Amino acid sequence: MKKLFTWQALLLLAGTVFAGYNVVKNFVTFYGFEGTIFKLQDCTIPNPVTQACFYGAVGFLIALIWSISLLQKPTNKKQHYLWWFLSAGTIFAWYNVTKEFILFYGTRSGPALGCSATPITNPFLTPCFTGATIFLITAILSGVIYSRLSKQSN
């Protein structure tokens, strides 16, 4: 079981680093256009705080901290709640990926912008798609861990 908890934490660490990198990159780009990170209206590109990537990064960080606490003291209840949190994060992420696919393949007059406010050249190569995939894999692993914990406690 310890290995599964470790894999869960490592996957969430990878997701946190990946999403954090993309959010920082978005803030740097936004600052380059606007000269501030505090502007929310009438922006050349959307402020990263208003984008799904930002909230995905926050979700990854919360789940990472949660998984580290489970590494130290695993409980069935905490794992169950983490599984629900990751499931909700997965739904949120795939909802945003679906929006990107619709934008990319739908009729439009210019380039489609993804969740990180960058043009989509291939919807399978967007940060949103990668983050959603990491969320999905981690949610499945979390469910497996919860199932095994439940069997052990019975």
Image: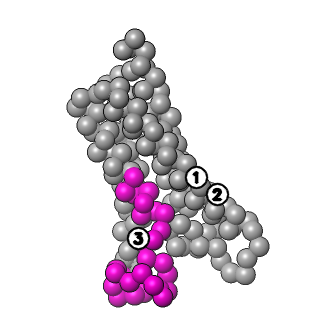
The relative height of residue 99 versus residue 64 in the rendered view (above or below) is: below
The relative height of residue 129 versus residue 102 in the rendered view (above or below) is: above
Structural distance between the alpha carbons of marks 1 and 3: 19 Å
Callout 1: 10 Å neighbours few (<14), some, many (20+)? some
Q: Residue shown at 48%/49% (left/top)?
A: 89
Left or right for 119, reference 34: right
Q: Amino acid at mark 1?
A: Trp
C-beta proximity under 8 Å, tags 2 and 1: yes
Q: Residue shown at 63%/62% (left/top)?
A: 99
Instruction: Please tell me how many numbered marks the rendered image carries.
Output: 3
Which of marks 3 and 1 precedes in the sequence? 3
Residue 82 % position (x, y): 39, 38
Q: Residue shown at 64%/57% (left/top)?
A: 98
Residue 15 % position (x, y): 41, 50
Q: Which residues are magenta?
A: 31-59
Residue identifier under label 1: 94
Residue most extreme to the right: 107
Q: Residue shown at 49%/81% (left/top)?
A: 45
Q: Quadrant of the C terminus?
A: top left
Q: Amino acid at mark 2?
A: Thr
Q: Amino acid at mark 3?
A: Val
Which SS class for mark 3?
helix
Q: Is residue 51 magenta?
A: yes
Structural distance between the alpha carbons of marks 3 and 2: 20 Å
Q: Is residue 106 magenta?
A: no
Which SS class for mark 2?
helix
Residue identifier under label 2: 98
Q: Nearer the viewer, residue 137 or 147?
A: 147
Residue identifier under label 3: 49
